[in-house]
Image (cartoon, rainbow, N blue to C red):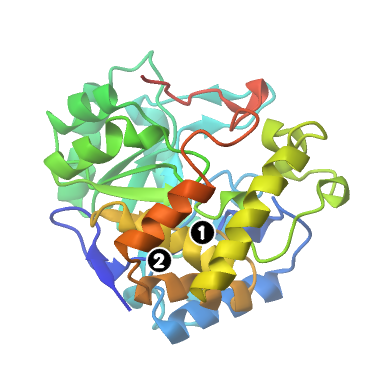
């Protein structure tokens, strides 16, 4: 399985990590037992980059699930590169705060929930433009020196924000949505990360399930499913998107890989400093996702994927208007 450094000075981790947002039921009903089985499988097969946030599942829900797992498995925490995030106040109304006092308080609450004295990577989940990015990065740099966090991350930011932040303190990682149907980071962010020695961490690399082995059924999404409000899964857009993705599944079969493995492998093939953190609450899906860390796609295979799913193929925006607060646009 391929391993990559998480930033120029960061730890070596499997190139496929584990996104824990779905532990809180964002994509359907689940149980803590299933989440614990998924984490146990991750330990077993060496998926050692775990990503969560203080708001996933509701305030502290997913962090608490990880924390209870760490308490029951004392050897697990030292084997995991652990990332979490702060800055979003869910509301209503939803708010974003980056002021140092608030961020410090959120970090301390996250550490308590996670049953740990430090996290290896702490992200500003969204940028608050009322607080200069240089101000909070300078303070977070002191948290690194204090040993509370191993490195600083930025989520869903613009290249200009990364550039300003990195002028104050090294940024270990930038996290953004990136997949076959979401390619904005190609327009400057991935290249800037390379130049700065910053890892690029791709979430939703399987398109929120769109590039799974079987077609989705949006009308069966549960009431609180994030995708119900997402334009790409609307009654108008989904059939058009599914028609195109069906051709991708056929190509995956021809290549000899499950569709989600091929989708993750495509993202990893884009640059050597890219990591993927597909979310799952299933040990079976986790193990399948991890297979991408052992796949090397040929130039011909990459070209075939591009032919089937060219940049910009998706119908519908990646977020609804109510989902975009704090996401920085560029280009």
Find the distance from the CA under tag 1 to the CA under tag 2.
8 Å
Which residue is located at x 56 percent, y 36 percent? 313
Q: Secondary structure at mark 1?
A: loop
Q: Which residue is mark 1?
A: 278
Q: Residue 170: give x, y in percent of width and height.
A: 15, 41
Q: Give the mark count.
A: 2
Give the numbered dot on residue 152. Answer: none
Which residue is located at x 31 percent, y 52 percent? 270
Among numbered discs 1 and 2, the one appearing first in the sequence: 2
Indicate the quadrant where residue 302 lies.
bottom left
Q: In the rendered image, which quarter contains the C terminus?
A: top left
Which residue is located at x 25 percent, y 22 percent? 160
The residue at the far bottom in this view is 44
Vertical side of 60 occupied by 167: above or below: above
Vertical side of 218 occupied by 254: above or below: below
Residue 185 in the figure: left or right of residue 321: left
Q: Which residue is mark 2?
A: 16
Residue 313 in the figure: left or right of residue 83: right
Q: Residue 293: give x, y in percent of width and height.
A: 37, 72
Q: Residue 227: give x, y in percent of width and height.
A: 71, 41
Residue 76 shows in this picture: yes
The residue at the far top in this view is 130
Q: Closer to the camera, 267 or 155?
A: 267
Q: Secondary structure at mark 2?
A: loop
Indicate the quadrant where residue 3 lies.
bottom left
Q: Residues within 10 Å of mark 1 (few under 14, many from 20)?
A: many
Tags 1 and 2 in contact by the CB under 8 Å rule? yes
Indicate the quadrant where residue 138 lies.
top left
Q: Closer to the camera, 327 or 210?
A: 210
Q: Residue 284: give x, y in percent of width and height.
A: 62, 78
Q: In the rendered image, which quarter contains the N terminus?
A: bottom left
Q: Residues within 10 Å of mark 2 (few under 14, many from 20)?
A: many
């Amino acid at each position: 399985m391929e391993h990559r450094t998480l930033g120029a000075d960061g730890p070596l981790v499997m190139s496929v990590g584990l996104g824990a947002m779905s532990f809180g039921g964002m994509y359907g009903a689940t149980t803590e037992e299933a989440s614990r089985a998924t984490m146990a499988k991750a330990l077993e097969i060496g998926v050692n980059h775990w990503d969560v946030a203080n708001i996933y599942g509701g305030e502290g829900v997913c962090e608490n699930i990880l924390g209870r797992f760490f308490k029951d498995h004392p050897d697990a925490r030292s084997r995991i590169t652990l990332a979490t995030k702060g800055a979003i106040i869910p509301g209503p109304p939803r708010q974003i705060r980056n002021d140092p006092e608030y961020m410090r308080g959120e970090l301390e609450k996250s550490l308590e929930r996670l049953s740990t004295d430090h996290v290896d990577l702490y992200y500003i989940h969204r940028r608050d433009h009322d607080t200069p990015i240089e101000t909070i990065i300078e303070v977070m740099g002191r948290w690194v020196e204090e040993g509370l966090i191993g490195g600083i991350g930025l989520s869903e930011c613009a290249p200009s924000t990364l550039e300003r932040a990195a002028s104050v303190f090294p940024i270990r990682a930038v996290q953004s949505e990136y997949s076959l149907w979401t390619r904005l980071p190609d327009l400057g962010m991935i290249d800037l990360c390379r130049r700065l020695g910053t890892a690029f961490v791709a979430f939703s690399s399987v398109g929120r399930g769109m590039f799974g082995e079987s077609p989705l059924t949006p009308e069966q999404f549960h009431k609180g499913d994030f995708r119900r409000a997402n334009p790409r899964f609307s009654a108008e857009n989904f059939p058009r998107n599914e028609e195109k993705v069906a051709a991708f599944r056929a190509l995956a079969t021809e290549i000899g890989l499950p569709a989600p493995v091929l989708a993750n492998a495509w993202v990893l093939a884009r640059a050597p400093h890219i990591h993927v953190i597909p979310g799952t609450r299933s040990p079976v899906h986790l193990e399948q996702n991890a297979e991408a860390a052992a796949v090397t796609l040929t130039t011909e295979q990459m070209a075939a994927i591009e032919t089937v799913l060219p940049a910009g193929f998706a119908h519908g925006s990646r977020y609804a208007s109510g989902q975009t607060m704090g996401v920085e646009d560029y280009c």
